[in-house]
Amino acid sequence: MSRLKTVGKIVLVAVGVVVLLGTVAVGYAAATGERKLQFADTPAPAIVASTDSAVIEQGRYLVQGPAHCSACHSGSPGSPRDPAHPEMINQVPLAGGFVFAMGPMGTRYARNLTPDSETGIGRYSDEQVARAIRTGVLPNGELSMFMRFSASNLSDEDLTAVISYLRSLEPVRNEVPPGSWALFGKVLMTYAFGAMEPRLATAPVHVSRADEPSVERGEYLADNVMLCTSCHTINDMATFLPTGPKAGGGLPEASHGADSDMEFVAPNLTSHATGMTGKLSEDVFVTRLKAGRVCLSSIMPWENFGATTDSDLRSVYRYLRSLPPVENDVGPTYRPVGWKPGVE
């Protein structure tokens, strides 16, 4: 009997130690989790906005077209973009406010990109705005995971054009909440996520728009501007590094819309018979992108890609066709959550 009591005491002590360690670990994450996102010393690109009309027009094309900035940052004062009407994203101010509801991790908001001096980018220098786009580090020094992994990695020429266009917009006063990280989000950042660092790679070589499509232009667009090869590749969500073959297709992800019982999967884009550029001719590929969205809840910026020139879309097609073919039939790209081959 005494032996049982001794074992019981040991178990209780062990449980107590585990609980104590868990409490200390959670407390440490709560106090320090956000420090992992602080990179105030990250250098800013030496970008200066231009007033040249051609540069501004190029910026407009990028923001509303292939760089898809308006997909997240369009909005109106006091009212985030209506998810039920994505066709409006290029017709309303880039006043921000779109909510990124991340469940137990927290809530973030798309910022006001108009040059308002109090609530928009008018309070920041060209270099601060350029740093946010290029590296993901916001003016307050915080690394934005959305800007780091979802914003286009533009050449110096295109980065200048985008900022020039944003400076040319009509200022819109729209105070966007700063956003917050929940305790669970801080715990994940501290113990689960890999090293989160700014994007510090050398800026990509600029390849100008041209009437004649080219693989070089397509590579610049697909890898850096439209981010086709990022979204359509399997990535490790702890490190955000690619683990699957380039453009070979992604993993299923539950819809973020009201259709939460459905899921999307980014299809294989390579030239294999199971890939989109293997199945579709160049003309059909361009026509499909121009046709726009079928599902309201799709996170692909269909409206922006539909506003991209035919020449640029043909360039992307030719670049994707040049990649090593990958055999990967992902199945229906929009299907019930948990779909398996052979199950209707």
Image (cartoon, grey):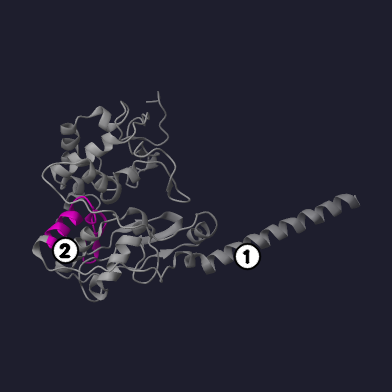
Residue under the point 42% across and 54% down? 103
Tell me the SS state at disc 2: helix
Query: Disc 2 designates what residue?
Result: 165
Q: Name the residue rendered at 71%, 60% in the picture.
A: 17
Q: Residue at x 32, y 27 (%)?
A: 274
Counting from the top left corner in percent of width and height, residue 58 is at 14, 57
State whether residue 175 appears in this view. no
Q: In the image, which disc is placed on residue 197?
A: none
Q: Position of residue 40 (x, y in %)?
A: 40, 71
Point out the residue furthest to the left here.
53
Q: Is residue 93 magenta?
A: no
Q: Which residues are magenta?
A: 55-82
Look at 39% across and 70% down and name the residue there: 141
Task: Name the residue tied to disc 1.
Answer: 24
SS state under label 1: helix
Where is residue 229? Give x, y as percent: 32, 43
Mark 1 Cα-neighbour bin, 10 Å: few <14, some 14–19, many ≥20:
few
Amino acid type of the residue tagged 1 in the rendering = Val
Q: Earlier in the sequence, mark 2 or mark 1?
A: 1
| Nearer to us in this view, 178 or 33 | 33
| Residue 225 in view here | yes
Which quadrant is the C terminus positioned in? top left
What is the three-letter code of the residue carrying label 2? Tyr
Up the image or down, 341 lies above or below 247; here it is above
**Viewer-nearest residue: 18 or 188:** 188
